[in-house]
Amino acid sequence: MNTIAARPVDAVIAAAREFLGDRLSTAQAIREQHARGEDQTPPTLPDAVAFVETTEEVSRLLALCHRHEVPVVAFGAGTSLEGHVNPVRRGISVDLSRMTAVLEVNPEDMDCLIEPGVTRQQLNDYLRDQGLFFPVDPGSVCTIGGMCATRASGTNAVRYGTIRENVLGLEVVLADGRVIQTGGRSRKAANGYDLTRLFIGSEGTLGIITKIRLRLHGIPEAMSSAVCQFPDLEAAVNTTIVTMQSGIPVARIELIDADQMEACIRYSKLEGLRATPTLFLEFHGTHAAVKEQAEAVEAIAVDHGGEGFSWATDTETRTKLWQARHDAYWAGINLIPGYRGITTDVCVPISKLAEAILGAKADAVASGFTTCIVGHVGDGNFHQIILFDPKDPTGLDRAWELDRKIVARGLALGGTCSGEHGVGLGKREFLEQEHGPEALAVMRGIKASLDPKGILNPGKLFRN
């Protein structure tokens, strides 16, 4: 009589059910929800999804998977854009979204300790009454654990830095189930390897983050937002470059091109604005400092043909403005009904920004694609949504070819293939181009040392 040999993953599922119970699911619908993020990679169903709630559960689960050599992929909110959470080799999807405790807040030292499933919005709601906030704002509803894993950035990075600059320490479960602590509450230290920075941006390939100690900031005395529209893309970009080179400490400076602006006006019902290149700006500080900064930027904008400089100091208007910016991705992919989009993530030195953006837009026009550009341009980072018709059998391949052209120009200008979205599946081919074979060999060596059986998010960062 023929028998079907038991798979290693079946042993893991059976053992994990003993301590997870019905929080270990093999239901089709649950597996489909964990098959990919917001990217265009083909979905892959994991064999099971584990809804963990403690570090101990993560540790026991990883020890099991390590013993049986079963792949493990960490999952937060599922909003990644480069295929990070796609379990390409199946295995177990470890959902950390139930680990949502704010464990500790130290107002005097402006730091806190949280679990990885906490979102930026949840944390800032918790902190508001204490006069503190967490500034890293990628624009989507994502978990802070996922932000650490992908080295997230966002609209406030030009003033407050990326997630890398705002994490003081981590608790990480390694591939074999060991738990380590990195960093601490001190604002600086000069001892040993910087393991915290090693795990920031490692995309779940070196360990699973289960606690995060964050640097917090005081809520500014005054905040003011502004919108300024320009006759062409070059004028808007050059206004950004001069503003940054002048040393004006803007909190946010976001570029939206004409196509993206048309999408935002439709999607977010923005009134009184035209579909022309636009800058969204925000200033933080004392009332006097905010006024001085805003007037300085307005003068620069006027010199470059900017017009319609309108101010928003009340919370309701500012919130509507920035919500439209945060919804720009959804607005962009809905610009042409039925179309889908892939997103670039180039970042270049500020002096090369005009060449990078104008060249990228010209490439898109020459390739016959409608694209929407939105960028955290204060730090040289921009995204270009390439819209393609899924009914066109060559559409996606041609979109990827345009993406390669945009990245190639960014690298040639001294930039990077990914300013904040990470590598995942979508940017693997560019890693060696950017870093060189020897640096890539070192990265592979670190991976092999911490995860010798290759169970942690296999297939990501490195090809083969």
Image (tube, grey):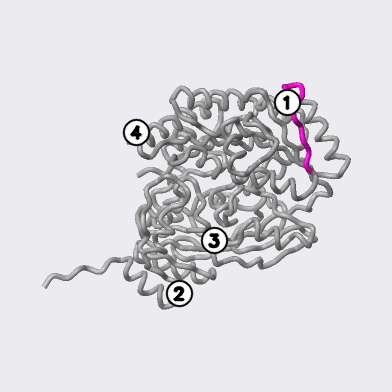
Q: Is residue 303 magenta?
A: yes
Q: CA distance from mark 3 to mark 2?
A: 20 Å
Q: CA distance from mark 3 to mark 4?
A: 42 Å
Q: Which residues are magenta?
A: 302-312
| Mark 3 secondary-structure assignment | strand
On the image, the x and y values in percent for residue 147 come to 57, 52
Res 450 seen here: yes
Q: Are marks 1 and 4 in contact (CB under 8 Å)?
A: no
The image quadrant where one finds the N terminus is: bottom left
Q: Nearer the viewer, residue 320 or 403?
A: 320
Q: Are marks 2 and 1 in contact (CB under 8 Å)?
A: no
Badge 4: how crowded within 10 Å, few (<14), some, or many (20+)?
few
Residue pictured at 78% horizontal, 62% vertical: 129
Q: Amino acid at mark 1?
A: Gly
Q: Nearer the viewer, residue 398 or 202?
A: 398
| Mark 2 secondary-structure assignment | helix
Badge 3: how crowded within 10 Å, few (<14), some, or many (20+)?
many
Mark 2 highlights which residue? Answer: 20
Q: Which mark is residue 172?
A: 3
Q: Amino acid at mark 2?
A: Leu
Mark 4 highlights which residue? Answer: 394
